[in-house]
Image (cartoon, rainbow, N blue to C red):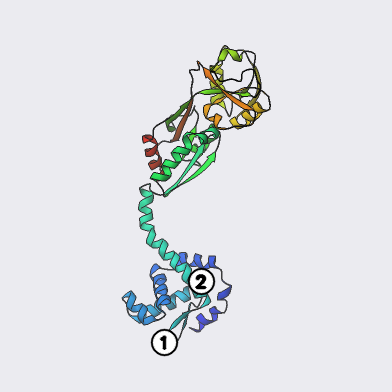
Amino acid sequence: MDAVRLAHDGAERRTDAGMTDRLSAMLSLEQVRGFVVVAEEGNFRRAAERLRMTQPPLSRQIQKLERDIGVLLLDRTQRQVELTPAGAVFLAEARRLLALAEAAPSTARLVAAGRTGTVRIGFTATTGFGYLGRFLNEISRSLPEVELTLTEQVSAVQFEELSSGKLDLAFARPPFDRAEFDARLVHREPLVLAVPEGHRLVGTRPLELTELEGERLLVYAPGPARYFAELLATTLAGISYDSADQLTQVHTMLALVAAGRGLALVPETASHLHPEGVRYRPLAGVREPVELYAVWRRQPANPALRRVIELLQAWPDS
C-alpha cells in the first residue's frame, strides 16, 4: 500500500476526463461495481455480503483497481472506509459507467428496432411553412426517442449530401437520380403571383397568364434552382415578358418584389411569408403544380430512418 499512498499525493491534480478515459480503457465492470458498493456501504464486510462474495477477494479487487489507475480511492480504518477526494470524483464516474453498461443492451435493441437514433433531414426554404412541420410533429409523436437534425438547403445540395451520407432524408424538388434514390411525392401546390403593393395587377380574382405580357418578372437561376426555372419556362411558354434578376431563394425573391424590382411566380406556401408591400394573386389555367418529394438512398442502413420512412409511406400527402 506504500506505493498506493505515494500516488495519492498527486491525486487531486488529476482531471475528471483523464479518470473517465482510464475507467473505460482498462477497468472491468466487476472492479467498478465492487468499488461503488464499498463506497456506498462504507465497510468491506457489508459490501462483500451485498455482492455475495467473501471479503478478501473484494479487498484485493479494490487494491488492484487503485494500482491500475495509480490513485488511492479509499481511506481505510479498522471500522470504516471513507472516500478520498479522488475517490469521490471516481465514484461519480463509476456510477455513470455502470448506468451506461446497464442501459446498453436495451439501447442497442431500441436502435436496431429504429425506436431511437438520429435522422438527418434536409429541406427547402418553403417546405418549412407547410408539409414539413406537420410531418416532423408526427415523427416526434410516434418516435419520441428519435432525434431529428434539420438543415435548410437547395435541392441540388441535398442530393449531393444524400449521396455522400451527410443527410438521411431530403425534402426537395425534382429532378433526381431515381436509380440511386427512392422517393415519395408528398405535396403538390399551385403557383401564385407575388405583386408589389400598388401594382396594376393587385386584386383578388384569379389572374390570367396573358395579363403578364410585357411585365418585368424575377426568374429562377437555372443551375441551383433548376426545378423552378424549368417550371417557370413551361408555365410562361408563349408569354412575352421582361426577365429580371436570376435568384435561387424564394424569400430573396419576395424581398425584391417588395422593393419593386419585378413580379414573381412562387409556390403558394410562400404566401405564409408576409413581407411588407407584397400581395399575392391566384393564377387561372396553370396546369403544372409545384411538387415536393421526400427522397432517400435506396436500402437505407439507419434503422431510425427506416421507421421514419414507414411513417412517411403511411402519412397522407397534401
Q: Quadrant of the C terminus?
A: top left
Please tell me how crowded label 2 is: few (under 14), some (14-19), or many (20+) other residues with Cα within 10 Å: some
Residue drawn at point x = 46 percent, y = 64 percent = 24
Residue drawn at point x = 49 percent, y = 20 percent = 288
How far across and how far down the image is residue 181, in percent? 44, 33
Q: Amino acid at mark 1?
A: Arg
Residues marked 2 and 1 touching at CB (< 8 Å): no
How far across and how far down the image is residue 302, in percent? 41, 44
The answer to whether residue 249 shows anywhere in this view is: no
Seen from the viewer's position, the closer of residues 55 and 190 is 190
- Residue position marked by numbered label 2 in the rendering: 89
How far across and how far down the image is residue 97, in percent? 44, 64
Q: Amino acid at mark 2?
A: Val
Residue drawn at point x = 45 percent, y = 68 percent = 94
Seen from the viewer's position, the closer of residues 270 and 238 is 270
Residue 276 versus residue 164 in the image, above or below? above
Seen from the viewer's position, the closer of residues 140 and 206 is 206
Query: Which secondary structure lies at badge 2?
Result: helix
Using the image, tell me which numbered label, if any, was put on residue 79.
1
Residue 226 versus residue 170 in the image, above or below? above
> What separation in Å lies between label 2 and label 1 (alpha carbons)?
23 Å
Residue drawn at point x = 36 percent, y = 49 percent = 112
In the picture as drawn, the residue positioned furthest to the left comes out as 52
